[in-house]
Amino acid sequence: MSTDGLIVVDKSGGMTSHDVVARIRRLAGTRRVGHGGTLDPMATGVLVIGVGRATRLLTYVIGADKSYAATIRLGQATVTDDAEGDVIATTPVGPLTDGAVRDALAGLTGEIDQVPSAVSAIKINGQRAYKRVREGESVELPARRVTVSRLDVLAIRRDLPDVVDVDIEVACSTGTYIRAIARDAGQLLGVGGHLSALRRTAVGGFTLAEAGTLDELAHRAPAVVNLPLTVAAERFFPRRDATAEETKVLSHGGPLDPVGRTGPYAVFDPAGGLIAIVSERAGRARAEIVFAPA
């Protein structure tokens, strides 16, 4: 019997997020497994997996801020805006200065309107954009408002002729495409660009420090959950402790008196069990999700 909770996986390259979910299903011995935000096959790093009742927390995980370490290659544009796609244009970077590179990336920070990569999982009329592109369609996606709260340039390297590699660290809102930052930097500089490496270092408060590879998790199977449901909820949300009477009301879907908190929070029963995720509106604290007893 699997335990309800979250697993912080350090995904290896070459796997889809769905591949990871399928593997965890086998290791945990349950079909009820999901992930909290897709990572491209090329990318490595933090992928938060929900098991059992904790899959209901994933909607909040998906909306959390993310952090990445990445490398942008300037001088080559690709069809996918990353290293997985064919190179469609090369432009010698010749006189490109470090200052120009830093200025271009500085212009892609803060609140920006970003056009997602055409080869993305966004749906257009019910079909994923990447499927339309692979079928030969030209896809134009509308710009979306995202926030790049931090973009640090760690190194600007000229190890190979005709290209410049830029190592960066990024902290951003959900829905931000690091591939699109690489593409847009290349366009601003007039030389084209794509993402040549990507590692997700954090999703909300979940970091690589507590992540395990699938091989490491396989050694622990079926005890693969490292953050049981109550621990995961306490890590991710502010905590409210309910009385026995409040527990009874809330577990049946009834509202509680508000305590003046903005945003969702987790409510625990007197025994320390998770009852619900609650948010306050119209003067009442109402459950967004009620967790039935295990």
Image: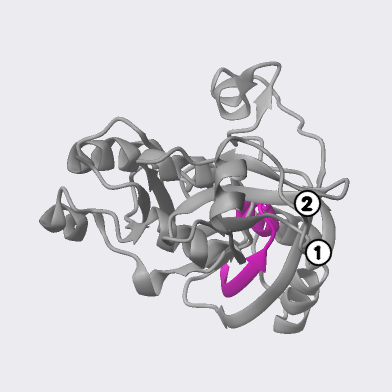
Give left or right: position of 199 versus 8.
right
Is residue 167 one of those drawn in magenta? yes
Q: Position of residue 204 (x, y in %)?
A: 57, 64
Task: Find the magenta span and give its range.
Answer: 163-182
Instruction: Relative to 211, say whether 140 is above or below.
Output: above
Pick out the residue farthest to the left: 219
Q: Disc 1 marks which amino acid? A: Gly
Residue at x 74% of width, y 78% of height: 102
Q: Identity of the amino acid at label 2?
A: Glu
Numbered-mark total: 2
Instruction: Name the colouring of the figure.
Output: one colour
Distance CA(mark 2)–CA(mark 1): 8 Å
Q: Position of residue 284 (x, y in %)?
A: 80, 48
Q: Can you give x and y, in whole percent of width and height, for residue 244 in the image?
A: 53, 54
> Which residue is pictured at 83% across the width and 69% down the height?
107
Query: Which residue is farthest front?
Result: 245
The residue wearing badge 2 is 280
Q: Is residue 108 left or right of residue 77?
A: right
Q: Looking at the image, is 29 positioned above or below residue 282?
A: above
Q: 5 and 163: which one is in front? A: 5
Q: Please say whether residue 144 is visible from this viewpoint.
A: yes
Tell me, yes or no, if residue 81 can be seen here. Answer: no
The quarter of the image holding the C terminus is top left
